[in-house]
Image (tube, rainbow, N blue to C red):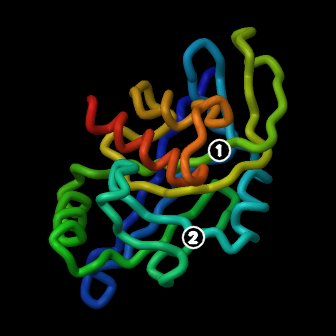
Amino acid sequence: MNRLFVPEFRTALTGEQENRMSGHASVFGAMALIGSHWEQIDKRAFGGALSRPDDVRFLLNHNPDNLLGRTSSGTLELNTDEGGLQVRSTLPDTTLGRDVRELVRRGDLTGMSFGFKPTNHHLGRAPDGRLLRTITELELYDVSLATYPAYKESNDVVLRTRDFATMAKATDRRSQIIRARSRFLTER
């Protein structure tokens, strides 16, 4: 049976907790069709990324101009639970933060996604016979609230899973990925 990623997104928008949001940016074992093959995230994939002092950003639609929080400032907390990569954040008291809070409150914005570079994977076969790539280790760049969540049939999935090792060098890998993602999102 083929399973597509169904993001879980919860928000507590009452009283003093009005700006706290939580959800899962990735669900372990869920499969997504990426071009002609399937992809899934293994439960061990985030271990290394979460143990390093990387400064992960919380964005809206993977756009670096839409910053909502970051791990270095303490406004973004990341960990794994039995379901996947859990995200907890305090939204900023900015125009963007207030807009996001209202979109979530209305139920217009319900999905989450994550930006990463796979650093280890293994290949197998999905139940339908197609290639299945299981990501077992990765570098995590961002988590995002997403209008079109990852692991759905959307163009964002293709960019998110591109092999960045084949792209021309930028000042650093993170800047290269952010610029590519921003170009892609503005061209849609």
Q: Is residue 110 left or right of residue 9?
A: left
The quadrant of the image that shows the C terminus is top left
Q: Which residue position holds label 1?
A: 117
Relative image position of residue 69 (x, y in whole percent): 41, 72
Q: Seen from this angle, which residue lies furthest bottom?
A: 16
Relative image position of residue 63 (x, y in whole percent): 35, 51
Q: What residue lies at 35% left-to-right and 49% top-to-bottom?
A: 61
Task: Give the vertical position of 124 relative to 57 (above or below).
Answer: above
Q: What residue lies at 62% left-to-right and 36% top-to-bottom?
A: 164
The quadrant of the image that shows the N terminus is top right
Number of marks in the rendered image: 2
Q: Secondary structure at mark 2?
A: loop
Q: Nearer the viewer, residue 68 or 5?
A: 68
Q: Amino acid at mark 1?
A: Lys
Q: What residue lies at 59% left-to-right and 32% top-to-bottom?
A: 167
**Mark sitting on residue 32:** none
Q: Amino acid at mark 2?
A: Asp
Question: Alpha-carbon distance for marks 2 and 1?
Answer: 15 Å
Q: Which residue position holds label 2?
A: 55
Relative image position of residue 86 (x, y in whole percent): 57, 63
Q: What residue lies at 17% left-to-right and 64% top-to-bottom?
A: 99
Task: Give the vertical position of 95 relative to 155 (above or below).
Answer: below
Q: Seen from this angle, which residue lies furthest top?
A: 129
Q: Nearer the viewer, residue 93 or 126?
A: 93
Q: Quadrant of residue 29?
A: top right
